[in-house]
Image (cartoon, rainbow, N blue to C red):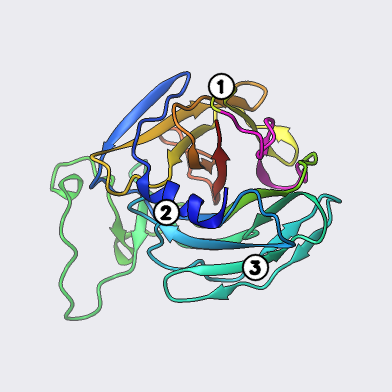
Amino acid sequence: MGAMAVRNTMIKGGAAALLAGTTLLFAAGSALAHTPYVVPFTFSPERDYVGLEGGMAEEGFFIPDFAIRGSGDWTVVGPDGVAKPVTPTTLKSVTVVDAPLPTEGTYRIGTGQRPGRQGKVAKVDGVWRQVRPDPAPGAAQPQRRMDEEPGAANTGPIDASKVPAGAEIVETQGILIAETYVTRGAPTPVKPTGAGFEVEPVTHPSEVYLDDGFTFRALVDGKPVPGLHVTIYRGGESYAAKRTAIEATTGADGKASVKFEQPGAYILETRYPGPAAPGAAPAAKTYVYTLSFEVTD
């Protein structure tokens, strides 16, 4: 599919996608947290390079609110398994990349690990609460939330100066990873690196068909991640009356499988680890991961 064809698919898409599991529909105005993405102008390039765009999206994919910034190395992993850096061009609203494809085969292209939001949480009266900076002198006070009312079970943010002395504090760091695969010519095998968090396509990412669906496996340092919640969105539903989110959960082997009703460009999103159990300390490091891919007839 060519660059214009992919873009048209993203803009015109709007039909429901089906999972062998649960399908959730969201109103068009509902907001997602800002999430990184990388998508090629074509998933099947014929030239010795491919253009890609990356951004941080909130209202839908693949429409950027702002560019992917910060430290981190964009990389292209070739059919030989060798990772090479590639230099992006970062604009205000979007990041663009021309990735070289010197030989035929399948390439894994991504942002690398990029630092996201930092913060602190404190355990106050047995509840973990986000710590926010104190308001500047003379500044308006933050609007009080319902869970901050007197007598309420306080679970909302707390000003730094109000954190009790000696309270347990955890510093948190988000790590953003966005990637995709493209194939020039015949597909070649893709392999996980075995380092850090990653999603391994069990179904070849360039051979995802409506009739067969898509199977993938979540890994941390090469080991399966069971019970991981994953959501897959269809691109181009920003103007749809309802948006479709395909929900899946990995099994004991870290695998999950989904099926689709319509072809198009899709994006898999997940966060590892998931929400902490009630009363448990939140993870110091959280990965936000996305993988864009194409579903064909």
Residue 100 seen from this side:
yes
- Image spot of residue 151 (x, y percent): 14, 42
User: Does 18 appear in magenta?
Assistant: no
The label number, if any, that marks residue 211 in the structure image? 1
For mark 3, what is the residue?
98
Badge 3 vs badge 1, beta-carbon distance below 8 Å: no
Badge 2 vs badge 1, beta-carbon distance below 8 Å: no
Magenta region, residue range: 192-209
For mark 2, what is the residue?
121
Identify the residue at image location x=67%, y=73%: 87
Name the residue type under label 3. Answer: Asp
- Image spot of residue 146 (x, y percent): 15, 46
Name the residue type under label 1. Answer: Asp
- Separation of marks 2 and 1 at Cα, in angstroms: 46 Å
Q: Is label 2 in a helix, a strand or a loop?
A: strand
- Separation of marks 3 and 1 at Cα, in angstroms: 32 Å
- Image spot of residue 155 (x, y percent): 28, 45
